[in-house]
Amino acid sequence: MNEDDAASTLKRSRASDLARHILPSSGTMIGICATLIGLVKILEGQTGPTYADECGAIIALIFLFSAIFSYLAIRTVIRAQVSHMFERIADLSFLLGLTCIAIVVALWTFEKL
């Protein structure tokens, strides 16, 4: 195995490292969104209706989008450019989901949602 082959293999393995972390984390965050929705539904009888459950469902879809693109990034590792693009989309959507869930929880805590 020459240096170019080794560098190419290393580059391919590094290309999907982030995607390999995003995929299970996105699945976990979808579960957290489902828990949030359940808690909101339980408390709606006491506190009245809110939009937190609808926001939680939308955020779960953002995390699903992230999981799909991280999976695609892992599966297309042979095509480095495509894999990198999918990984970047997965990364940005994961960060968007994290930001949105933090905002929803903060607003729900202060009863603004």
Image: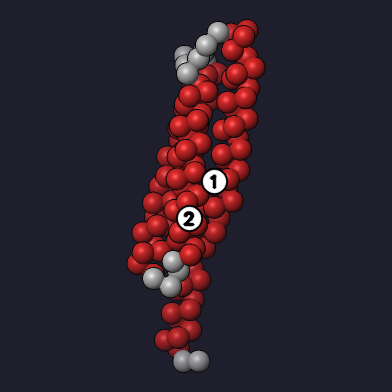
Identify whether 31 is placed above or below 42.
below
Furthest-bottom residue in this view: 2
Please give the name of the residue rendered at 48% of the width and 65% of the height, measured from the top-left corner. Answer: 75
Are the residues at dot 2 and dot 1 in contact (C-beta closer than 8 Å)?
A: yes
Identify which residue, 9 or 82, lies in the foreground.
82
Q: Which residue is mark 2?
A: 70
- Residue 106 is at least partly visible in this image: no
Mark 2–mark 1 distance (CA, rounded to whole Å): 9 Å
Identify whether 81 is placed above or below 86.
below
Q: Amino acid at mark 2?
A: Ser
Q: Which residue is mark 1?
A: 26
Circle 1 packing at 10 Å, graded few (<14), some (14-19), many (20+), is many
- Residue 22 is at least partly visible in this image: yes
Residue 36's quadrant in the figure? top right
Please give the name of the residue rendered at 48% of the width and 24% of the height, measured from the top-left corner. Answer: 54
Which of the two discs, 2 and 1, labels the residue nearer the N terminus?
Answer: 1
Q: Position of residue 79 (x, y in %)?
A: 39, 71
Q: Is residue 95 left or right of residue 33?
A: left
Identify whether 23 is placed above or below 45.
below
Q: Secondary structure at mark 2?
A: helix
Residue 48's quadrant in the figure? top right
Q: Amino acid at mark 1?
A: Ser
Please give the name of the residue rendered at 47% of the width and 26% of the height, measured from the top-left corner. Answer: 55
Q: Position of residue 44 (x, y in %)?
A: 59, 12
Q: Position of residue 103 (x, y in %)?
A: 47, 27
Q: Position of residue 35 (x, y in %)?
A: 63, 30
